[in-house]
Image (spheres, coloured by chain):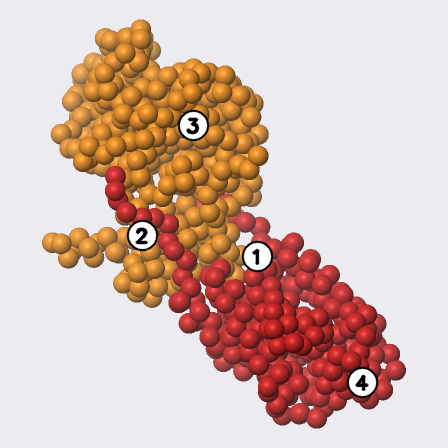
Chain colours: A orange, B red
Amino acid sequence: MKKKTFRGGVHPEYAKDITAEKSIQDLPAPEMIVISLQQHIGAPVDSLVKKGDSVLMGQLIGNSSYAVSANVHSSVSGTVVAVEPRPHISGRSVISVVIKNDGQDNPCEMISHSDPIQLSPQEIKDKIKAAGIVGLGGAAFPTSIKLDPPDQANIDYLIINGSECEPYLTADDRMMVEEPADVILGAKLLAKGCGAERILIGIEENKPEAIRNMRDHAGSNAIEIVVLDTKYPQGGEKQMITALTGREVPSNGLPYQAGVIVQNVGTALATTQACRDGRALIDRVVTLTGAGIKEPRNYRIRLGTSFRVAIEAAGGFTAEPGKVIAGGPLMGSAQFDLDVPVMKGTSSILVFTKEDSKQFDPMPCIKCARCVDVCPASLLPVRLEAYSMNAMWDEALEYGAMDCIECGCCTYICPSKRFLLHWMRLAKNEIIVAKRRQTG
Amino acid sequence: MENSRLIVSPSPHVRDEDTIHKIMFAVIIGLLPVLIAATYLFGFNAIRLVVLASIAAVVTEALCQKIRNQPITLWDGSALVTGVLIGLNVPPTLPSWMMILGSVVAITLGKHVFGGLGYNPFNPALVGRAFLVVSFTLPMTYWTTPFDAVTTATPLELGPQAVAYPDLFFGTIAGSLGETSAFAILIGGIYLFYRGVLDYRIPLGYLGTVLVLTTILGLDPLFHLLAGSLLFAAVYMASDMVTTPVTPVGRWAFGIGAGIILVVIRIWGSLPEGVTYSILLMNAATPLINRWTRPRIYGQGVSKNA
Ligand code: SF4
Ligand code: SF4
């Protein structure tokens, strides 16, 4: 059978076997929790608590009136000891609620629903919004907003992204293996929420057990499990859509304009918990992995647990670490402060040894065109790099800089070890700034 | 748990294993069958010329980089590739000093006047060869038979009636050191293709165009594929990364364009062979080809019909 896929892409070493066979384990909640008030794309939310307040597990502690925002909840019960800027995965300090855990896990009131599929689309969206659910694949876009596209757009397909194409990551894989029924239920709820008739669940072929378990639980023929080629970035939203439906998302546009909404496996699971159990998003499955960590595996971690505590719980470092990465090796961000907290978008804590963390000096471009061949957006990274280096922003725009999905395939493949993606990002930034200046 | 020691760099955090250095040495390995065939057919002359050309190229590269105050990057292997290529591109009897001069010109005028590796618009080995042909026309067109080194003409000059296909295929004919054995070139080309350093589009476009055009013109297509340096150039020179288009369509266009020019020169030109000029001309057209053959960007031209 010819497996579905997309144009371009690369085959890095997957290194998923480190954790793929091990079941998800609960990581005990630490004594101190730091809940960042910026968990999603968009501005930070306002704190609803102050120093000295006591909070319950699952209690709403932050929200905002902005359109693009998501509620934030306490992941433990205890006392607020500070509301102050703390290190954040972005590298900046962001206002955060620091909570001393009383170890009781006293929950706040949760409204459960024995047959959540009976809820109306609006009720589903309300519950997702109340629970503060965002895209758990890493982008952290508020899910309820995604389910409510503008202009009454017609949605034909809800896609569940189970490709997990980043090397090392196995969190989605384990969720599909261990909790397929809840993932499927979440998919149905999400589909009902956005009015999609059909559900497609795309899984890369390197996850046979997940494919089997999901097929066993899919049941109705409105749900199709599609096996995809193992290739990065198969899980890129646009690549997923094209591989599964043959449609393309318009340039500068959003998936709903192609009649599709994509959600991640973890998001589906969180949706089930929100609608059925009335549970807010206060923990997530994180892959702790890499040669630099003693006991790599997937852990269910309370949001706000610091990287330091999580790594210690996983046995600590094997040796002096080289890099600690939030997310996967292709798109994740290297951290310099281990006090950053696990957030809603933290799919992985990846620890590289010194040997893994090779640094490269760029060599001259030999026009090998490998970057062109692998670019999933069909750009010419080699040209864009040159335009960006010479501050030729108009040309960069014309050559499609804004269509770059920042997957990093070009930098990955370049035999001259050039920092292509870095220059893409610079060009995109400059173009956005220039546009803002123009429109005032 | 020392925070400050952590390395912070932008994503991606993993890289493919291939480097310029590995690519260049793969090309050298891909040239080995041809080197062996040349040595077998032309004996000591093959070794003499290829070794001299290589040493001259590498030394010139180092001198150029020193003069231009650049880091010396001999280990990248690109100068060596140029040296071996030009060495395989001359008749077996070429005097040593001419060989050295050709190699020096290839590296200086072909490469470093433009800024060194990656910046040269023309294939350096072909620049060197073109220089030799223009400056030393007689020695560069003085052909001898393999093994016994009897003076003769090349198959292209003799015409299809005068040569047998097996001779053309295995290379027991007169010609430049590396060009005669189609068999050795095919082995090298297949290796390079599977190694991922040879894009199939340019060689196929080039050879295919010659095949089609000579057939249309009522000539012997197989003869035109095997005689002369077409096959060697298609595999090792026309496909040079630095001097050819980066777009997929552009690489087809390059091959087809070179094929058309070659047939025109061979049939109507005053030269018996036109491989060098067909490639150099297409090298010159490469920036334009890149501009005209941009791929359609994902999502562009797709309507937002919601
Ligand atoms: S992959 Fe690197 S060396 Fe090759 S064309 Fe692109 S930028 Fe140049
Ligand atoms: S240019 Fe952008 S989209 Fe294309 S490979 Fe590079 S990072 Fe990915």
Q: Quadrant of residue A238?
A: top left
Which numbered circle lies on residue B19? 1
Distance in Å between CA atoms under marks 3 and 4: 68 Å
User: Is residue A321 depicted above or below A61 in this figure?
Assistant: below
Observer-side mark, 1 or 4, equals 4
Closest to the camera, between mark 1 and mark 3, is 3
Estimate the spatial distance between the alpha carbons at disc 1 and disc 2, rounded to whole Å.
Answer: 36 Å
Q: Residue furthest left?
A: A440
Q: Using the image, name the chain to which the residue with label 3 belongs.
A: A
SS of the residue at dot 1?
A: loop
**Residue located 31% across and 39% down the image:** A258
Vertically, is A251 above or below A273?
below
Few, some or many C-alpha atoms within 10 Å of disc 4 (few <14, some 14-19, many ≥20)? Answer: many
Disc 3 residue lies near ligand 2 with CB under 8 A: no
The alpha-carbon separation of the residues under discs 4 and 2 comes to 59 Å
| Label ID, residue B301 | 2
